Image (spheres, helix red, strand yellow):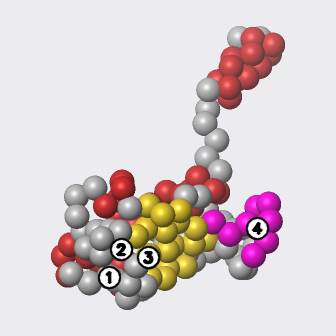
Amino acid sequence: MNLSLFSAVALLFLCFVDVVTPTDVTRGSVLGVFLEVDKYFRDTGELPPSLDALRQRAPKLSITDGWGWPLHYSFSDTVITVASYGLDGKAGGSGWNTDRSMSYYVRRPDGQLWIGTDGWILQARQTHF
């Protein structure tokens, strides 16, 4: 195969290859954490106290973002949030350093528990990336 034909085939191939960004990896890690939070709650009736508690139950769970920084987990009686601080790993910033977070409601608007019910992961999202 001559060089120009090889270059054309390589260029065509690259046009169909998806690029996975650090933000995509972070989104996947955050969603994985929420799936494990739901499983933890279904098994114990409690929210996990930390990401480490989730890792004890699911050792392969990624608790880092797409830049290799640890994710940040917080919860209250009403909302669970998982956040990434972006490329620099510090709160605040813009561009690649922008904080990214996702939050889910723990309770329905009527006060009933939402977490641990069928559809929670699909319906209770408060904020998006």
Q: Nearer the viewer, mark 1 or mark 4?
A: 1
In front: 22, or 34? Answer: 34
Which callout, 1 or 3, points at the residue further toward the start of the chain? 1
Q: Nearer the viewer, mark 1 or mark 2?
A: 2
Q: Which mark is residue 47?
A: 1
**Where residue 87 appears, x then y in whole percent?**
73, 67
Q: Nearer the viewer, mark 1 or mark 3?
A: 3
Label 1 with label 4: CB-CB less than 8 Å = no
Q: Range of the magenta residues?
A: 92-100
**Where residue 27 appears, x then y in whole percent?**
54, 58
The residue furthest bottom is 49
Say which element carries label 4: helix
Q: Amino acid at mark 2?
A: Val
User: Marks 2 and 4, how far apart in space?
Assistant: 28 Å
User: Marks 1 and 4, how far apart in space?
Assistant: 29 Å
User: Marks 3 and 4, how far apart in space?
Assistant: 24 Å
Q: Which mark is residue 106?
A: 2
Q: Which mark is residue 97?
A: 4
Label 3 with label 2: CB-CB less than 8 Å = yes
Q: Amino acid at mark 1?
A: Leu
User: Marks 3 and 2, how far apart in space?
Assistant: 5 Å
Q: Is residue 110 left or right of residue 76?
A: left
Vertical comparison of 36 with 6: above or below: below
Vertical comparison of 25 with 65: above or below: above
Q: Nearer the viewer, mark 2 or mark 4?
A: 2
Which callout, 1 or 4, points at the residue further toward the start of the chain? 1
Q: Name the residue carrying label 3.
A: 79
Toward which corner of the image does residue 61 lie, by quadrant? bottom left
